[in-house]
Image (spheres, helix red, strand yellow):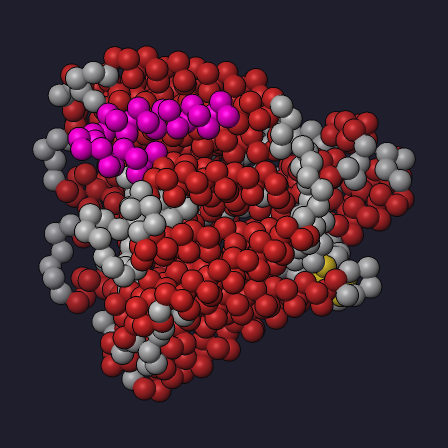
């Protein structure tokens, strides 16, 4: 079912680990060169930058070629006809992705990825145009229209399984999340259905990943499980959509409390507190980095959304306390771990064991350092001098939005 | 054959020692499991949330709180942060220096961000430099460069570079007839300054690991500036020539130094620039789409050749 053989993927994984260990000084250069010869793989890989550029140009070619076809041959065709051709293009793109991956042995090469992504897009466009472009506005036909995201979800899931593209899994989740809106106008039911879908997916992933512990598929399933936990959390937290609205920050918001029944509303509030510890416990038990990260994110989101849930007024100093809490947790955890025997407690350590963490910290530092001053520090005044320190979204260390 | 079977095989062959086998096998099993990255992200998020709340509170409540309290609190945090950093800093070195404590980098970052807030507050309230914001930014950039090099901190280096960019931007915005052309020229000056400065510092062996940050920022600003010049319909010739030269340089640099980000910059910025110039006279949809198909295929073939020849290493 998977496009690449397990042996090839295991070899690639061993090759990556060898490079990492050699970089860390755990292997001598002679050892690395000798062992590298034993991990020669027939799959063609490239680095992340060329992969992104190849992806970009493949999208351009496919988009332009399809556009050209429609302009030359189908400029006056009906939507249904165009839809049928989109479906054909979806099949062609998918077949091309299979050929590039299997015949040319491309592995995360950008080209086969763009072709697979195009096949999902064309399939959804094609189905919408071919079957639902002239629908009568009735609830029955609207429900039938849910076939479009359903098929999109299935194809994305298949691509995730067949090719192993991690981003096909969140695409599946997004398609799935859009399904309940076709079936019912009740928001509470929509939230429950999304959570149930993700819950079913979670059970499936947990069962499947148990047979791949420490294997090359572990990261794939780990990320899928983490995304499903996050999806469930986002589905049950009814207050997240209000967090971005600054007007509601100061005055609280109660709009969604009226939209849902009281038992449902308070059940979801309880769940937002129950889920983060469950996810964190699962992540720690499994020593799963992605699941631990989602548990931490869910815990922070629960803290941030708690006041709106309870209808309490939020204050400008709330982030100060949140920041102090996060810092304190990090410091205490680090201190507690470092006091264990050899800096290890229950199999966990706060010390750096591989160069990967440092590398990502460096990249993150460079990027976020450029962005953060613009988003955090107050702005210089505009033209009229205000005697008091007032508002602004940009400035300070990074200053002007003019540059 | 999974990685554990391979390790056993390599040990049996004598390619690795039993100690190496035990260590590498335990690393592959996640034993011990390092929370280094997670704890650092948590610290970083904590500092950001704290500073965001501080800035927001000062902005919203400065009138009620009063100048004395605001300045006292901000100055106290600032003094505490810098006292911590200067009292614990290791001896300065040209080479990369590890942070003396696990929180050192974040305390310095906190101090730098609080510096920005305090400076902005003081100028807004007391107009110490009569609204000369650009001078504040220039001084802040200089101060952050000093801190970044003294304490070997990339967070603060990025703050310094963005403050310097802010100084260029603010200086131009105060000119009576500032136009996009002026911004473009100053963006080029900024990128050249950052690029040449970074190169000189690297050549002198001064914190050579910062060079990548300088080069990436300089390259992106330069490409954006040149590309915006190419988009100008009237006088795009020189800008286009400049873009071609920079693309060629980025491509050569990327391939020779195996810095494939620069190959990607050259491909994307170059393609956008050339297409924008060539497609100006196109008013035919078929021709336009044909252009994208043909040039897209040409780019794809070229990039595949590059990937096969140079870019295999992950």
Q: Residue at x 38, y 43 (%)?
A: B136
Left or right of B147: which side holds A116? left
Residue B96 against residue A267 in the figure, above or below: above
| Quadrant into which the C terminus of chain B falls | top right
Q: Over which residues does the magenta segment extend?
A: B168-197
Residue A209 against residue B268 in the figure, above or below: below
Q: Residue at x 34, y 50 (%)?
A: B128
Q: Position of residue B38 (x, y in %)?
A: 60, 57
Q: Position of residue A87 (x, y in %)?
A: 28, 41
Dominant secondary structure (helix, strand or loop) of the stretch shown in magenta: helix
Q: Position of residue A256 (x, y in %)?
A: 27, 76
Residue A373 or residue B288, whichever sits in front: A373
Q: Is residue B182 magenta?
A: yes
Q: Is residue A320 magenta?
A: no
**Residue A163 can be seen in this image:** no
| Quadrant into which the N terminus of chain B falls | top right
Q: Position of residue B280 (x, y in %)?
A: 18, 19
Q: Which residue sits furthest bottom?
A: A263
Residue A387 or residue A230, whichever sits in front: A387
Left or right of B169: which side holds A42? right
């Amino acid at each position: 079912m998977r496009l690449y053989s397990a042996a090839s993927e295991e070899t690639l994984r061993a090759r990556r680990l060898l490079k990492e260990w050699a970089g860390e000084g755990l292997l001598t250069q002679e050892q690395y060169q000798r062992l590298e010869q034993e991990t020669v793989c027939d799959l063609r890989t490239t680095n992340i930058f060329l992969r992104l550029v190849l992806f970009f140009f493949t999208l351009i070619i496919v988009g332009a070629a399809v556009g050209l076809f429609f302009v030359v041959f189908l400029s006056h065709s009906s939507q249904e006809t165009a839809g049928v051709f989109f479906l054909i293009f979806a099949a062609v793109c998918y077949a091309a992705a299979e050929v590039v991956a299997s015949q040319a042995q491309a592995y995360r090469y950008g080209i086969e990825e763009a072709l697979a992504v195009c096949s999902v897009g064309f399939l959804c466009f094609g189905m919408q145009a071919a079957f639902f472009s002239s629908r009568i506005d009735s609830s029955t036909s609207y429900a039938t229209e849910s076939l479009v995201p359903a098929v999109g979800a299935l194809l994305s899931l298949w691509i995730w399984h067949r090719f192993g593209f991690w981003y096909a899994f969140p695409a599946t989740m997004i398609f799935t999340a859009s399904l309940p809106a076709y079936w019912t106008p009740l928001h509470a039911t929509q939230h429950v259905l999304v959570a149930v879908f993700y819950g079913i997916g979670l059970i499936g992933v947990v069962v499947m990943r148990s047979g791949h512990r420490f294997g090359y598929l572990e990261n794939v399933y780990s990320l899928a499980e983490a995304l499903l936990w996050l999806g469930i959390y986002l589905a049950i937290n009814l207050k997240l959509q209000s967090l971005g609205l600054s007007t509601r920050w100061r005055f609280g918001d109660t709009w969604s409390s009226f939209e849902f029944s009281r038992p449902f509303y308070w059940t979801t509030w309880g769940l937002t507190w129950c889920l983060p510890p469950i996810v964190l416990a699962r992540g720690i038990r499994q020593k799963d980095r992605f699941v631990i990260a989602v548990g931490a994110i869910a815990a922070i989101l629960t803290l941030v959304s708690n006041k709106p849930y309870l209808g309490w007024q939020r204050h400008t100093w709330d982030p100060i306390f949140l920041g102090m809490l996060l810092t304190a947790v990090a410091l205490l955890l680090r201190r507690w771990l470092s006091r264990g025997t050899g800096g290890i407690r229950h199999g966990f350590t706060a010390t750096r064991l591989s160069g990967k963490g440092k590398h990502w910290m460096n990249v993150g530092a460079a990027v976020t350092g450029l962005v953060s001053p613009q988003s955090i520090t107050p702005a210089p005044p505009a033209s009229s001098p205000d005697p008091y320190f007032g508002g602004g979204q940009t400035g300070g260390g990074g200053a002007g939005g003019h540059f | 054959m999974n990685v554990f079977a391979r390790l056993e095989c390599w040990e049996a062959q004598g390619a690795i020692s039993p100690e190496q086998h035990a260590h590498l096998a335990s690393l592959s099993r996640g034993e011990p499991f390092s929370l280094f990255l997670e704890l650092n992200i948590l610290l970083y998020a904590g500092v950001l949330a704290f500073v965001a709340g501080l800035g927001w509170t000062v902005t919203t409540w400065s009138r009620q709180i009063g100048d004395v309290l605001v300045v006292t609190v901000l100055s106290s945090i600032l003094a505490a942060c810098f006292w911590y950093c200067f009292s614990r800093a290791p001896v300065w070195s040209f080479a990369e220096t590890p942070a003396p404590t696990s929180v050192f980098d974040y305390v310095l970052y906190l101090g730098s961000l609080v510096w920005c807030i305090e400076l902005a507050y003081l100028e807004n309230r007391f107009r110490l430099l009569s609204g000369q914001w650009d001078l504040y930014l220039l001084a802040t950039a200089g101060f952050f460069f000093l801190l970044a090099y003294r304490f070997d901190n990339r967070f603060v280096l990025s703050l310094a570079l963005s403050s310097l960019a802010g100084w260029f931007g603010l200086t131009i915005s105060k000119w009576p007839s500032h136009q996009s052309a002026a911004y473009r020229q100053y963006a080029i000056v900024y990128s050249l300054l950052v690029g040449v400065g970074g190169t000189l510092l690297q050549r002198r062996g001064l914190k050579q690991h910062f060079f990548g940050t300088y080069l990436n920022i300089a390259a992106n600003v330069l490409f954006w500036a040149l590309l915006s010049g190419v988009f100008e319909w009237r006088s795009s010739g020189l800008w286009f020539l400049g873009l071609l030269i920079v693309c060629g340089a980025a491509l050569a640099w990327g391939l020779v130094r195996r810095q494939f980000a620069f190959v990607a910059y050259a491909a994307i910025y170059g393609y956008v620039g050339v297409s924008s110039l060539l497609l100006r006279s196109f008013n035919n949809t078929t021709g336009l789409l044909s252009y994208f198909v043909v040039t897209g295929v040409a780019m794809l073939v070229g990039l595949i050749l590059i990937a096969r020849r140079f870019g295999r290493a992950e």
